[in-house]
Amino acid sequence: MASSESSLQALEGLMNEFFSPGATNQRKREIEELLNNFSAQSGSWRHCFYFLAHTQNEYVMMYALSVFENLINRQWLGVEAQDKMEIRSSLSKFLLSHHKLVPTFICNKLIKVIVCIGRLDWPHFYPDFFSNIIQLIHQPQMVTLGLRMLQTTSEELASPREDLSMARKEQLQRLLLDQIPTILSIVTRILETILDKHRQLVTTATPPPSPTHGDSNDSSPSHIAYGSSPLQSGSSIIRSMFKATPVSKQNVLPLPPLDHDSEQVSLLCLHCLSHLFSWIPLSGSITPNLLTTIFHFANFGCDIQSVQQGSTSPSSQKDLNNSSFSSSGSSSLGVLAMTCINEIMAKNCVPTDFEEYLLKMFQQAFQLLQRVTKDTTEQSVGNKMSELDERYVEKFTEFLRLFVSIHLRRFESNSHFPVLEFLTLLFKYTFQQPCHEGYFSCLDIWTIFIDYLLDKTNTSRCPNTSNLVDRYKDALVSLITEVLHKLQFRCNQSQLEEIDDEILNDDSETEWQNFLRQCLEVIAKVAELLPTEAFRVLYPPFQEYLDVYMGLAQFVTETQEGRRLNITAEHECRRLHCTLRDLCSLFQSLGRLSDHFIAERLSERFDDALSLIDKFCQVTVYGTKMKLYKVKTAIPTVLKSDFIDVHAQSLAALQAFTHWISQFYSEAQRNSRHHDKFVPLVTSIINAVTPLLAKQVPEKILVSAAHLFLSMATTVRPPFLIELASVQILFKDVSGGSLSGLQDEVQLLVCRALSNILILPWPNIPETDQQWALRSQHHAEFIQRLTKEFRSLKNMSQLAKDKSLQERAKPTIRRTLQLLSDQVESIAGEVSKTKQVCHNSLQDSIDVTLYLFPLYIQQSDVINDMMGFYLATFQSLRVQMGIPAIQHTITIFLELFTRERLTVTILEEGNKGRGVVEKFLQILEIIVQEPGSAFKAFLPTIISICMDHIYPIIAQRASPDIKPALYKLLFELLQSKWRYFFSTTVLTKLQSGAETVENEQQFVAIMQAFGQSFLQPDIDVFRQNLESLETLNAKFKLYHKKIFRDLMLYSFLNVFLQVMLHKSHDLLQEEIVVTVYNMAAVDFHNFFGTFLLQFLQSFDGLDGNQRQTLECNYKKEQDLPSFMQNLARLINDLRYYRICNNALPEGSVKLL
C-alpha cells in the first residue's frame, strides 16, 4: 500500500510538472518517456486502479485511463480472461459510483474505454454489455449516463477503426442493427415523457394562438406584385394542406421552460438520434411518433424567447410566459432536432414504404417554415429570422437544400404536396435571411430547383415541357424580381454599402463582386427557362437608369478649372451614385442574357436585341465623347469611380453581344436592309473604342476596350474594318510604339486584334475575294515594324561577346517574344492560309530567336520566353515550318540541353528553370506525336534525355515540379511510337508464335519510371500515370504483353496493394482497385493461385496460420464489384493483423 501511495504521489508530481507553464520541452520529453515506460510494464494497469480510486488529480485520472485504453486497443488479445473480467468489472463499478463526481471529460473517457472493451468482446465475452446500457437508461438517476454510453457505442461500433477484421466489423453492424428498434423505442418514450410532463403544466392555461395566427399579415415583400400568382394565396393553401393530416392539439401547444434535468436528457437523446440516423437505414423502426416528437423539439429553435431568455429581465418574464412561443431555455434543442431531421433527409435511398413518412416529415417541416418566416407579432418591424439562433437557421437551410436536391423529384407530382406553396415559403425564407451567407445558400437552393426544371424540360420523356414551365412561371419571375430589388443600391443602399469592394478573396473577387455574381447567376438560370420574362424584368430599370446617365451632359459646364458637374446637393449626389452603381449591375445582368438572342432565337428576338445593342452602343459613344471620369464633381472619390465603372461595363456588355453582332453580319450579307444597319453600328463601336486604347485612359476602361476590340476583330471581323480611318490610325500608332508603358495584357490584346484583322478569313466570302496577297503584305509590314528592334539584334556583331549589351537587350527580346507567342497561340485552330500568312511574317523572327538561343542559354528567364515562343510555333505552325526547319531546330536544342545544362537548369534557385525544362519536354512531346518516320531518328536521343539526364535528377524529389511534363512525354512516346518497341504484327506473331520486343532496355526503363512514381506522395502524378497505364492497356493490351507479365506485373500489383495498405492515396482507391482488377484479369488463375500467395508470404508481421486464414477467406470471384469488395476485405484484415501482432508482447500466441 505504501508503495502504491508513493507511486501515486510521484505520478501526481510528474503530471503537475508536465502541465506547468515553466516546464521546458526537454523536461516534458523526459517525463513523457518515464510515463511511457511505466505504461509498457506488464501489469501496470493494476496500479492504475489504485490511482483512479485515490486521486483527485484530473491529469492522473486521464493518464490512468489512457493506460487502460492502450491496453485494450493494442494488447487486449494477450490479456488473460480473468484479468479481462476484473478490468471490465472494476471500470464499470468505478463509472457507476463516480460518474457524477468526476469532471465530464473524465467520465466520457471512462465511457469510451468501457465501450472499447465491448467493441472487442461483445457479445461472446461481454454478453451483458448492451443490456447494461439499456438498464441504465431505464433508471431515472442513471438515464444521462446510459444515454452517453449509448451515443459512444454508436460512434465506436457503427464505424469502427481499422483495428478490427472486416468480419468483426460486419458482425458489430448486424448486432447494432438488431438493437435499433429497442433503442429508438426507448429514446422515443423518454422524449415523449418529457413533453407530456411539461404539457401538463399548461393544460389549465389560456390556449395560445394557433400556429397560423397572424397569417393575414404573412405576405411577401410589399414591392412585388404577384398578380394572379398562386404564390399570393400560399398561406391559406398551406393551412388546408395541414388540415389533410391533422395534428394533435397538444402538438401545437407551446411549452413552458424545460427544467435543467429534462433539458439535459433531451439534448442527450437528440445527440444519440443524430448519430444513429447517420448510419442506420430508413425503416419502420423510425416511427411516425418518433418523427413527430423530434419536430416538437425542432419548434424550440424557431422560438425567439428561446434565444433571448438568457438576457430576459424579471419584469419581462411575465410577458415571456404569456408569449405564443415556447419558452425553452435553450435553442440547442431545436438545432439538434433539425440535425436529426437532416440526417434522415440526407439519405437518397428511400424504401417505398418510407415515402409516406417522408411526406409527413415535409408537412411538419413546412409548418416550422411557416413559423420561421412570419413576423414575431402583428405589430413587429423587420423579420423574425434575425433574432433566431444562427445555427438553427443554418440547419433549416440545410434541410431545404436536402429536400430540393434529393426528394423534390419524389413529390413534385404528388397531389398531397403543393409545390407552389412550398416555393412561397422558400421565397420568403430566402429574402428574410439576416446575413449574406444565408442568402447565398438559399440562392443555391433555387439554383438546384431551376436545374431540376431544366433537366425535365430538356429530356424527351417530358412531353409537356411548356406546361411545366408555365406552372412555375410566376414563382420564378417573382424570384428574379426580388433578386434584382435586393442588388440595387436605390432600394438597399445602407446594406449594400457595407459590402466591401476592395479586398480580393481567394477567388480574386471582392465581397461585392461575389454578391453580385451570385445574384446574377440566379437571374441567368431563370433566363434559360424564361428569357423573355427575364428581359422584361431587367429592361425597365435599365432604361430608367440609362436616361439619367445619358442626361448628365446637360449638367456639365465649362469652367476655368475645367469641366464640372453641376450636381452638388448631397442627396442628389447620393441618388446619382446609387443610379450609376445599379446601371453597372444591369449592364452585367443584360450581358448575361446574350446567349438567349442568338442561334435559333435570332430572328424571333432580333428587334429586342438590336434595340438593346443600340443602347449599349450609344452609351459607349457617349462615354468616349464625354469622358465623365475627367469631370470635377462634388464628391470625386465616389463619382469618378462610378463613371469609370459605367463606361467599362458598357464596353463589357457590348463584348458579350459580339456573337450576336457576328450573326447579324451574316444576316446583313444576305439582306441589304440589315446591311444598312450593320455597317453604321460596327463603325460606331470601333470609332468609340479605338480612342480608348491609349495612355491616360483609366485601367478598367482600357482593359474593357481592348477586350471588345479583340472580340470585334476576331468574332465579327467584317472586311471593312481595315478600311476604317480609326483602325488605320491605330495600326500606325501601335507600330510606332504607342502601347509601350501600358500593362502587358492590353498590349497583347490590341496587337492580337490588329493581327487578326489582317490574317483571319472573312466570313461568308469566297476564297477568291479574300485578298490574301494584299493582306499578307500588310501583315508582314505590321510584324516587321513591331519586331524591328528585336530583329536588329542579329546584326549586332558585339552582342555575342558583350554581356552588358546582352543584358540591355533582354527587355526587347522578352517583350517581342511574348507578343509573338500570343499571336501564334491565338491562331492554333485557324485555317491553313491564316497560318501560312502568319508564318511568312514571323520567319525572320524565328531565325533571330534561334540565333539568340545559344547566347542566352544560361539565363532562364529569357530562355523560358524563347521556349514558350517555339512551343507555340511548333503547336500552331509546324506544318508551315516544314520538316527540315523543325529537324534543324530540334538538333540545336538537343545539342545545347546537355546533361550538365539540364542539371543546372532544374536545380536553379527559386525554380526559375522549371518552366524552361517543362516547355522543352512539351516540344519533344509534339515531336514524338508526329506521324511518320521523319523524326524517328530523334527517338533514342529523346529517350536518353528523359531517362538518363532528367529522370535521375527529379525521381527522388518530393516536389512534383517537371514530373507531370516528363511522364506525359513518356506516355505520348509509348502511345504514338508503340511500334518502336513492338513492331511485330498480329500475323507475324501468329506465324512465329513469339512476341519480340525492340529497344527492350529503354522500354523497361520507362516502365520502371512509371512504377517508381507510384511510390511518391504526389497524388496528381499518381493519378496521371495510373490513367496512362490504363490507356495503354486499353489501346495496346499492355498488361497482356509477355515482357510486362514476366518482368513487371507482380511489381506493379505489389506496389498498388502496398499503397492501399498504407492509405497514402485513398482518394484514388477506386481507380487503383480497377487497375489491379485489369491486371489480374490477364490471368485470374495466376493472380489468385500465385501472386496472392507470394504477396502474403512476403508480407511482414504475419505468421503461417494467419496467412492461411487470409488465403482461405479470400473469395476468388472474377466480376469487378465482387473483386473490389474482396480486395477491400483483404486489405482491411491485413491492417488488422499487423496492428494486433505489433501490439502483442514477445512470445504471445497470435490471433488466427
Image (cartoon, rainbow, N blue to C red):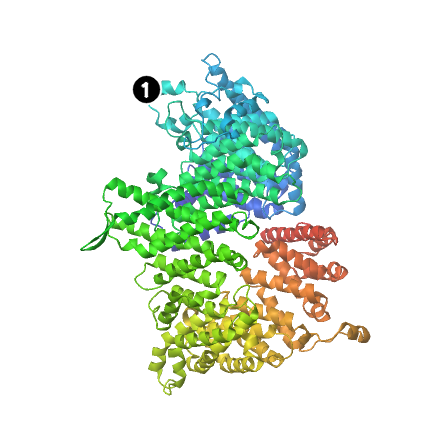
How many marks on residues? 1
Per the image, the residue denoted by label 1 is: 315
Furthest residue in direction top, as rendered: 204
The residue carrying pointer 1 sits among few (fewer than 14), some (14 to 19) or many (20 or more) residues within 10 Å by Cα, namely: few
The residue at the point 51 percent across, 18 percent down is 197
Residue 652 seen anywhere in this rendered image of the structure: yes
Residue 984 picture location, percent across and down? 74, 75
Seen at 54% across and 50% down, the residue is 603
Who is closer to the viewer here, 58 or 517?
A: 517
Amino acid, disc 1: Ser
Query: What secondary structure is found at the residue carrying circle 1?
Result: helix
Q: Is residue 566 above or below residue 816?
A: above
Q: Residue 789, image x and y in percent?
A: 37, 78
Q: Residue furthest right?
A: 991
Q: Which residue: 45% across, 61% down?
A: 712
Check the image and name the residue furthest to the bottom. 797
Q: Nearer the viewer, residue 919 or 553?
A: 553
**927 or 365, which is in the foreground?**
927
Instruction: Locate residue 143, reporting x and y percent.
Output: 53, 27
**368 vs 674: above or below:** above
Q: Quadrant of residue 891?
A: bottom right
Does the rendering let one see residue 95? no
Q: Is residue 970 above or below residue 483?
A: below
Residue 1144 x %, y %: 60, 51
Outermost residue toward the front? 672
Residue 294 or residue 376, whichever sits in front: 376
